């Protein structure tokens, strides 16, 4: 007979390693969204292509970090593994990658 122990909830104020890495990945996604938005807004300038690359790269990094946190989590929400932040980082990274790709494709047409 095997005994399955449920994971103990961790206080929301404590910063575990899983929560830290999900925050870092989400921050990369936010940076990518900002860079992509600025690249779309300044399409006529020469920095639009650079901003699109930054957005695309930051978005992919955010998705990779969020995916790692979600894959490594051994418990659900509230256990301290950062799974909620990992999912948020996945979504933000995906949005940043889409905006970066869109800005890059528009920058090619403008140039």
Image (tube, rainbow, N blue to C red):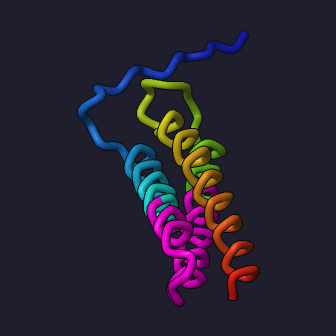
Depth check: give the residue in front, 34 or 8: 34
> Residue at 50% of width from left, 58% of height from top?
33
Residue 78 coordinates in the image, percent (x, y): 43, 24
Depth check: give the residue in front, 1 or 40: 40
The question of residue 54 being in magenta is answered with yes
> Residue at 45% of width from left, 62% of height from top?
34
**Magenta part, dominant SS:** helix
Depth check: give the residue in front, 95 or 88: 95
In the picture, measured across the screen, residue 31 lies left or right of residue 105, that is left
Q: Residue furthest top?
A: 1
In the rendered view of the protein, which quadrant contains the C terminus?
bottom right
Residue 7 coordinates in the image, percent (x, y): 49, 22
Residue 79 coordinates in the image, percent (x, y): 44, 27
In the picture, measured across the screen, residue 68 lies left or right of residue 51, that is right
In the rendered view of the protein, which quadrant contains the N terminus?
top right
The question of residue 44 being in magenta is answered with yes
Q: Residue furthest left?
A: 13
> Residue at 30% of width from left, 42% of height from top?
15
Q: Relative to residue 58, is residue 71 depicted above or below?
A: above
In the picture, measured across the screen, residue 80 lies left or right of residue 46, that is left
Task: Magenta stretch: give its range.
Answer: 34-63
The quarter holding residue 52 reads: bottom right
Depth check: give the residue in front, 96 or 9: 96
> Residue at 51% of width from left, 64% of height from top?
32
């Amino acid at each position: 007979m095997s005994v399955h122990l449920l994971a103990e909830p961790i206080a929301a104020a404590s910063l575990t390693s899983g929560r830290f890495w999900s925050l870092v990945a989400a921050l990369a996604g936010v940076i990518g969204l900002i860079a992509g938005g600025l690249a779309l807004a300044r399409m006529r300038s020469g920095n639009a292509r650079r901003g699109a690359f930054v957005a695309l790269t930051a978005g992919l990094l955010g998705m990779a970090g969020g995916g790692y946190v979600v894959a490594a989590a051994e418990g659900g929400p509230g256990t301290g593994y950062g799974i909620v932040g990992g999912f948020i980082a996945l979504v933000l990274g995906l949005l940043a990658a889409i905006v970066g790709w869109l800005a890059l494709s528009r920058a090619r047409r403008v140039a």
